[in-house]
């Protein structure tokens, strides 16, 4: 068992004092669509089927690739009013610190389309063992449903990636074995190796965070001590409090199968909040944590997420208006009984265009307080994602990274969970836009 599993004990104690009004309304990361609804071809959900091999039957995952590509994975193919205090927006804070339930990742869409199992014309079906991470292939490998949606347009990247080779591994890459038999919406160990937890000296859960390279050159070879989170998550941290970063975590209750590598912990030696962070408006909502030593990236369950190469890297819009589909991972709460979920959960969400998101937020605020939305302006430091019923990153998920997959297969952190109006509705959630803070991140 892990020697530092006090976070699990603390969270269990908190859950016993449940606020029943929260149960079933905010579940942390929410996602129960086995095929996803992405048009981007970036989803990591694939059709599974049994296959016969020597020694028994194993599961396979199948997807569709253009007929011009092969299935061979080795050929290189693939500021204003106090919106927080007034209760008009919902900071993604940890309610466990306020004697409530820390609801987190919500993944429970009501509309689950019937699965499509055949690839359309001009696509070939490729099947792989379920322990192969097809998401790392440098090719478009999509579900049959997504392939049939490609008439909406083929996803394109807004700029070339800025990657410096060096070190034991490149940023945004992962090497993990997908686990079968998990509940829908649960991740596999090592699937999101850049997502980390913040704990205080009592192992209370403070928030989530992301490991990033030392600067925007994305050079892992330089080593890194940088971790990013949402600034508002640190409001309860005093000068004398100890703050720890836990990396490589999956099951917060202990070191249990199918985990193969234990987590590591680092002590935060410096906290740098953005100088223009507003606790009332929650714009410029980012903080940089510096840990006491270089983070060990040698384990497969620990890595950095790449920093953006440009502002519009993932701004592509499909013909139906849908944006690039990205991922958030964190630790959630069970929908039925509201108990803390120790297993990391995940949800896929589309990016939402700036003006469209601003209008949706204005309308939602006006419903809460007529006229307030008319005076609201989305800040340039913010980016939006979501707006799908039953899928969101909610209360307690503040600081969790929103990562998008580039054409190379590497993952880039585009945003950090910050706030929203309600949760898991048709109103997008708001994230701190990482590319906006390029100079500040490089200088600190």
Image: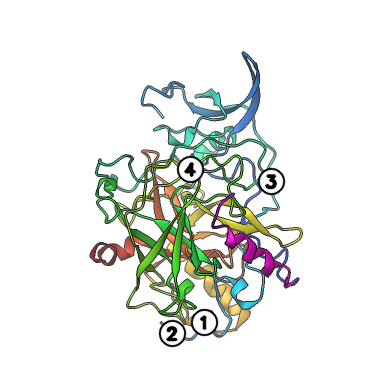
Residue 109 vs 174, above or below: the answer is below
Magenta-highlighted residues: 1-19
Q: CA distance from mark 1 to mark 3?
A: 34 Å
Q: Which mark is residue 80?
A: 2
Residue 120 is situated, as x and y percent measured from the top left of the image, at 56, 27
Of residues 240 and 169, the one drawn nearer to the viewer in this rendering: 240
Q: Secondary structure at mark 3?
A: loop
The residue positioned 56% from the left and 51% from the top of the image is: 2
Q: Secondary structure at mark 1?
A: loop
Assess whether residue 25 is covered by the magenta stretch: no
Mark 2 and 1 residues: CB-CB less than 8 Å, in contact?
yes
The residue positioned 47% from the left and 36% from the top of the image is: 135
The residue singled out by tag 4 in the image is 40
Disc 3 crowd, CA 10 A, few/some/many (<14, 14-19, 20+): few
Q: CA distance from mark 4 to mark 1?
A: 34 Å
Q: Secondary structure at mark 2?
A: loop
Q: Earlier in the sequence, mark 1 or mark 3?
A: 1
Of residues 300 and 351, the one drawn nearer to the viewer in this rendering: 300
The residue singled out by tag 3 in the image is 112
Does the image show residue 311?
yes
Of residues 259 and 171, the one drawn nearer to the viewer in this rendering: 259
Q: Which mark is residue 83?
A: 1
């Amino acid at each position: 068992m892990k020697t530092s599993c006090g976070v699990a004990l603390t969270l269990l104690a908190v859950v016993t004092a449940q606020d029943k009004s929260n149960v079933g309304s905010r579940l942390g990361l929410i996602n129960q669509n086995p095929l996803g609804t992405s048009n981007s071809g970036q989803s990591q959900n694939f059709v599974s089927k049994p296959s016969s091999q020597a020694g028994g039957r194993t599961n396979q995952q199948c997807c569709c690739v253009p007929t011009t590509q092969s299935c061979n994975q080795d050929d290189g193919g693939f500021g204003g009013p106090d919106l927080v205090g007034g209760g008009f927006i919902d900071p993604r804070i940890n309610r466990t610190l306020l004697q409530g339930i820390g609801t987190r990742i919500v993944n429970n869409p009501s509309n689950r389309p019937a699965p499509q199992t055949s690839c359309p014309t001009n696509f070939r079906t490729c099947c792989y063992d379920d322990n192969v991470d097809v998401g790392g292939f440098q090719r478009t490998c999509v579900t049959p449903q997504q392939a049939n949606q490609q008439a909406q347009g083929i996803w394109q990247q807004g700029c070339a990636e800025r990657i410096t080779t060096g070190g034991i591994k490149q940023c945004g890459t992962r090497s993990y074995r997908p686990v079968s038999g998990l509940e829908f919406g649960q991740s596999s160990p090592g699937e999101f190796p850049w997502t980390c937890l913040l704990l205080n000296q009592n192992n209370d859960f403070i928030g989530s965070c992301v490991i990033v390279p030392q600067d925007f050159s994305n050079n892992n070879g330089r080593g890194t001590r940088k971790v990013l989170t949402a600034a508002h998550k640190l409001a309860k941290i005093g000068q004398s409090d100890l703050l720890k970063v836990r990396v490589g975590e999956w099951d917060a209750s202990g070191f249990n199968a199918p985990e193969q590598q234990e987590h590591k912990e680092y002590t935060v030696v410096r906290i740098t909040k953005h100088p223009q962070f507003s606790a009332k408006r929650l714009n410029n909502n980012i903080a940089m944590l510096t840990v006491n030593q270089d983070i060990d990236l040698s384990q497969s369950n620990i890595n950095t997420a790449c920093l953006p190469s440009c502002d519009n890297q993932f701004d592509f819009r499909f013909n139906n208006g849908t944006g690039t589909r990205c991922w958030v991972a964190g630790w959630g709460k069970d929908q039925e009984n509201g108990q803390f979920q120790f297993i990391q959960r995940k949800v896929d969400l589309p990016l939402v265009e700036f003006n469209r998101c601003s209008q949706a937020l204005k309308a939602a605020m006006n419903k809460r307080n007529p006229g307030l939305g008319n005076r609201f302006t989305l800040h340039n430091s913010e980016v939006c994602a979501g707006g799908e019923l039953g899928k969101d990153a909610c209360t307690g998920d503040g600081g969790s990274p929103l990562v998008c997959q580039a054409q190379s297969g590497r993952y880039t952190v585009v945003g950090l969970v910050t706030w929203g109006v309600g949760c898991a509705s048709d109103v997008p959630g708001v994230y701190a836009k990482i590319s906006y803070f390029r100079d500040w991140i490089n200088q600190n």
